[in-house]
Image (cartoon, helix red, strand yellow):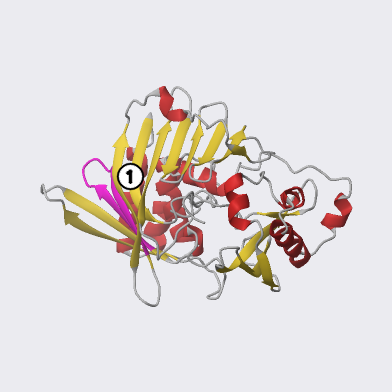
Amino acid sequence: MSKLLQHRWGFGLGAAAGAAAIVLVILLAFPKTQATAAEVMTKGAQAVARLTSIHLRGQLRADPVANFDSIDPDAAFCTIELWKQFEPETKWRYEKPGRVAVWDGQSFVMFLKTANIAAKGPMGPRNPFNKDWLHQIVQIANLSNTITNELNNAIAKGWKISHETGRADDGRLKDVVTIEAKSGRPDNDYLNNRFFDAADTRRIYVFDDQSGLLESVKIYLQAAAGDKLIFELDQIDYNQSFNPSLFQIELPADVSLVQNEMQKLPDNEKYAALTAEQAARAYIEALGRQDWTEAEKFRRMTIDDRTKKTFGGLELVSIGESFTAKDYPGRFVPYVIKLRSGEMITNNLGFKKDGNTDRWWDDSGCFVNLNPTSH
């Protein structure tokens, strides 16, 4: 499910009316199969226009701890779930095996379970966790808008869209809409196939012919080696009642909290003047000599004991020339390190400039031990 809410028609209409306008455009300008697909998706948007709650459950190829919109075609499937209550007030919970985030109607909490790291606070514009990707993931639960905007994107971007019918095991008629989504990214972009919106995908939506309700979704990664299933939404529960405790997280007493904002240092200008390569070298070398105070100047979280044990005393082997990737507001710095265990690690450090201090900070989490059993 890519950034479905980023592009709108701007008609000032509701989701169902907007979808109807799209159908009219397709009827006038596109072949019958596309018009039929648009009609099916419009009916699907109308069928879920007034939900009180929704529960989604599926399987995703991804690291169990990684960001919610991350994909990894080579990873095993992990279970993801999303609960959203629309009435009497909006609350939601999104969870995968290593990460969970909730909004209880007043505040936001995200917890990385194995790393024992949490972020919390309001979801206002100055909150660094008010991430576009998180909002887009949660907005998937607003199925009426999601279906409408998926159709919107297909038409606006020229994606191939088709329709066919089938039957379930019990004989019920199904409407199947397939959309071939193209990312428009360069073939050699570093972030290709790491996120939904950075991948070419084939998306299959299955609707009940009578009710119009969405019943399942499958997303296949399209690559030269062939299509590969990376996401399957196989459980959709409409208008359930949720226990209020679902939207609460009890954080451990020793959890490491991510800072809402980095603080300026007495010598902040010195760090603000560093290039990405210089900052990466200073950061990694500080980890190597176990100067945690210095290393934390390049982070938004304290360094916990597990991370200290893993990366303390490392040897920096090399730093490469930084590079960019499409739509990423930072730079990637190649590095090679050798841990005290003798393990060699080659990776790219994602660095961003903090808006408050103008210092580079580790956005990639390369130097956070997410595995409690490693090293």
Residue stretch in magenta: 202-220
In the structure shown, which secondary structural element does the residue marked by tag 1 occupy?
Answer: helix
* Amino acid of disc 1: Gly
Whether residue 51 appears in this view of the structure is no
Q: Which residue is mark 1?
A: 44
- 206 is within the stretch colored magenta: yes
Q: Nearest the camera: 371 or 97?
A: 371
Does residue 215 show up magenta in the picture?
Answer: yes
Residue 318, above or below 145: below
Front-most of 344 and 95? 344
The one nearer the camera, 213 or 53, is: 53
* Residue 232, image x, y percentages: 32, 53
- Residue at 35% over, 41% down: 56
Q: Main secondary structure of the magenta part?
A: strand
Comparing 67 with 123, the one in front is: 67
> Percent x, y for residue 269?
88, 53
